[in-house]
Amino acid sequence: EAGVTQSPTHLIKTRGQQATLRCSPISGHTSVYWYQQALGLGLQFLLWYDEGEERNRGNFPPRFSGRQFPNYSSELNVNALELEDSALYLCASSLADYSNQPQHFGDGTRLSIL
Amino acid sequence: QKEVEQNSGPLSVPEGAIASLNCTYSDRGSQSFFWYRQYSGKSPELIMFIYSNGDKEDGRFTAQLNKASQYVSLLIRDSQPSDSATYLCAVNFYAGNQFYFGTGTSLTVIP
């Protein structure tokens, strides 16, 4: 069974540009979560998508947005990139029974802002 | 504010010893608790999850949950150098299905 896959592995951008990160969940998983992990910091929750809808978002500005496609894959868009957006962005997926289901993580996209 | 707190460490134990990692959380309504292991530069890997009070064992790992005292712990028996990593505690507070992660405890197993 394939795990959560993310692309690209690395992404280098400059301030003000826009970045798009992609995620494919484990087969059968309908929920997709996005996290930001800045160097030396913990995981910060960004967004949760389920059945194509945004269900919850963390304390991030609106320039962080995303969507989920009918095949449950997802993309995260970050507009007007700032230096502090440099981080590892992790995608996770879980089964639809959210309450007790663990999240399984992809390998992440490392975003570097120059 | 729902919070999950871990001792950041670093925690060092000799090979073969028991490593004990602790996590406290702030919400009595929480029902799901998870332990992840994260090697440097890698993504978190699920080790165990626990829902009920008491102990849950899986190989060398034992998770312990005490809802009344609001803590969850992870014991690693017969620690190996390959166990050296950062261990993340995660709690699902249900409302909004949002996982809250602790900042992690760094564990080093000394050969």
Image (cartoon, grey):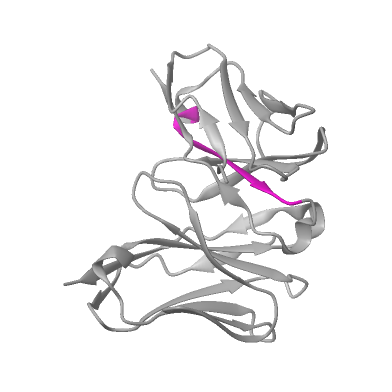
Residue at the front extreme of this rendering: A1
Quarter holding the C terminus of chain A? Answer: top left
Determine which quarter of the picture holds residue A100: bottom right
**Between residues A21 and A39, which one lies in front from this camera angle?**
A21
Residue B72 percent location from the top left of the image: 57, 77
Residue B36, above or below B110: above
Q: Give the range drawn in magenta.
A: A85-95
- Residue displayed at 45% across by 78% down: B59
A84 lies left or right of B78: right
Q: How many marks?
A: 0
B24 lies left or right of A71: left
- Residue displayed at 67% across by 85% down: B53
Residue A95 percent location from the top left of the image: 73, 51
Residue B109 percent location from the top left of the image: 25, 71
B25 lies left or right of B9: right
- Is B63 in the magenta? no
- Residue displayed at 52% across by 41% down: A106
Residue A56 percent location from the top left of the image: 77, 42
Residue B56, above or below B43: below
- Is A93 in the magenta? yes
Residue A35, above or below A69: below
- Residue A48 visible? The answer is yes
- Residue A58 visible? The answer is no
Q: Main secondary structure of the magenta part?
A: strand
- Residue displayed at 66% across by 55% down: B99
Determine which quarter of the picture holds residue B1: bottom right
